[in-house]
Image (cartoon, helix red, strand yellow):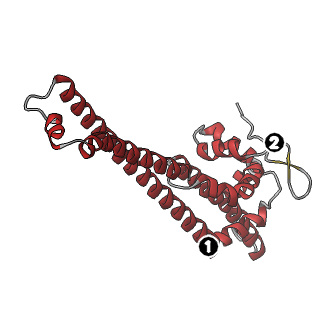
Amino acid sequence: MIARAFLFIFGALLVLCTLCIFLLILLPLASASLSSVYALFPNKPSPQYTAFLTATGTIVAAISVVAAILTFWFSTRAARHAQRKQHTITVLLETRLSSEFQGTIEKRRAYFPEYTDVAFDDWNAARNTMTPPGASMDVIAEHKVRRDSALALTTLLNYYEFLAVGITEGDLDEEMLKKTLRSIMCNLVDDSRHLIAGMQKINPNTYEHLTALYGQWRKQNARDINGSPNERPIPRLR
């Protein structure tokens, strides 16, 4: 909106300046006699007259070039903004309507439910659970749930890391994502903050974009639906 208003005002000023210049030239021609018209265009114009015409032409040309550049820049920016919003809407719709994504959420809840802190050691043990030979079907099923839940948790973290990268690169609209996913993403990172800290102790670049975005989006002194502290900072382990 601001860009369009600025472009409109600049265009109006350009038209006004151009009209004023032409009026300054044409009004004497309209009111003067034929002889005075010839006098305006002598065979050998004075240096001042020549300089005036040259300066006037240069100013008009410069203003026209600047207006063309600004028009192209604002048009390109508006098209880029519209494309980014459309891409963001597509990503959100595909996620919400994806049965696979919803299944990933359910698998995560099976062993690592929301509003429960996930320790790195617990997650690591769950994903590396080995089923002993000759185990019963119940034990096999239980171990599978633990492994799937650990994998699902990191799948969700990877998804939000992907969104954070998209925002950083300018491919996704941050304002739209913040309005729709802020609380969901912050809840997930709050639950996983010890897990992320453990991963970053091994590799500092793990979820670096998600960590930065969480730092920008999280609210101070936030509370979850149970009244417990929420959106806490990710600890730094040494």
SS at circle 2: loop
Q: Residue furthest right?
A: 227
Q: CA distance from mark 1 to mark 2?
A: 33 Å
Q: Is residue 188 left or right of residue 164?
A: right
Task: Please report the residue visible at 72 percent of the width from the left and 34 percent of the height from the top.
Answer: 237
The image quarter containing residue 215 is top right
* N-terminal label among 1 and 2: 1
Q: Position of residue 142 (x, y in %)?
A: 76, 69
The image quarter containing residue 52 is top left
Q: Badge 1 local density, few (<14 within 10 Å), some, or many (20+)?
A: few
- Between circles 1 and 2, the one closer to the viewer is 2
Task: Please report the residue visible at 62 percent of the width from the left and 59 percent of the height from the top.
Answer: 155
Vertical comparison of 190 with 153: above or below: above
Task: Residue type at mark 2: give it.
Answer: Gln
Task: Please report the residue visible at 34 percent of the width from the left and 44 percent of the height from the top.
Answer: 18
The image quarter containing residue 208 is top right
Task: Residue type at mark 1: give it.
Answer: Glu
SS at circle 1: helix
Disc on res. 100: 1
Camera-nearest residue between 103 and 215: 215
Camera-nearest residue between 217 and 149: 217
Residue named by callout 2: 220
